[in-house]
């Protein structure tokens, strides 16, 4: 006795087979690297301007670093300098050397570094680059 399978059923079985083999998880999916807990509030201790013609603001304010729920290497950073919020956003931490992690916007723009005791951040205002150092 010969088993007859209609072309429609064959197509469904073939499609299901392709779907099951094509949609399995990749072996090389991105795994977040666990990072130390560097969250907290850091007090700004110095501000310097890249241009000598531009005066650096007085070093008064805080840098707040908060972990984003569900991620181990993404933090939310809010920098308040002289009661003005000059930086707020999510930064990705990447291992630099020792206990230091570099902080990036997206995958390519390095915005600063953090080591648990000190945060160094760069920001631009009126086409002048400022560097802020804050400590716990």
Image: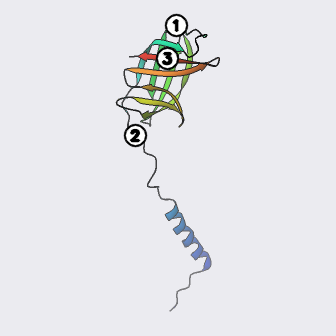
In this rendering, which labeled residue sits more in front, label 2 or label 1?
1
Is 115 drawn above or below residue 29 in the view shown?
above
* Farthest left residue in view: 98
Disc 2 to disc 1, C-alpha distance: 36 Å
Residue 102 percent location from the top left of the image: 45, 30
Q: Which of marks 2 and 3 is nearer the N terminus?
A: 2
Please state if 94 lies on the left or on the right of 6 as rendered: left
Residue for badge 3: 132
Residue at left offset 61%, top offset 75%: 8
User: Do labels 1 and 3 touch, CB within 8 Å?
Assistant: no
Question: Which one is nearer the viewer's eye here, 94 or 14?
Answer: 94
Q: What element carries label 2?
A: loop
| Quarter of the C terminus within the rendering | top left
Residue at left offset 55%, top offset 72%: 14
* Farthest right residue in view: 126
Q: How many neighbours does mark 3 have within 10 angstroms: few (below 14), some (14-19), or many (20 or more)?
A: many
Residue at left offset 39%, top offset 28%: 100
Residue for badge 2: 33
Question: What colour scheme does the image use?
Answer: rainbow
Residue 4 percent location from the top left of the image: 56, 85
Question: Which one is nearer the viewer's eye here, 24 or 5?
Answer: 24
Is 74 drawn above or below residue 21 in the view shown?
above
Q: How many neighbours does mark 2 have within 10 angstroms: few (below 14), some (14-19), or many (20 or more)?
A: few
Q: Count the marks: how many?
A: 3
User: Do labels 2 and 1 touch, CB within 8 Å?
Assistant: no
Residue for badge 1: 58
Asked whether residue 68 appears in the rendered view, the answer is no
């Amino acid at each position: 006795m010969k088993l007859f399978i209609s072309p429609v059923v064959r197509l469904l079985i073939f499609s299901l087979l392709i779907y099951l083999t094509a949609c399995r998880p990749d072996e090389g999916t991105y795994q977040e690297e666990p990072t130390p807990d560097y969250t907290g509030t850091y007090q700004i201790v110095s501000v310097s301007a890249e241009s000598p013609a531009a005066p650096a603001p007085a070093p008064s304010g805080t840098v707040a670093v908060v972990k984003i729920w569900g991620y181990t290497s993404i933090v939310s950073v809010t920098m308040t300098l002289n009661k003005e919020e000059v930086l707020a956003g999510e930064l990705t931490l990447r291992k630099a050397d020792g206990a230091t992690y570099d902080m990036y916007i997206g995958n390519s723009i390095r915005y600063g570094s953090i080591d648990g005791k000190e945060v160094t951040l760069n920001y631009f205002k009126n086409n002048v680059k400022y560097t802020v150092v804050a400590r716990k």
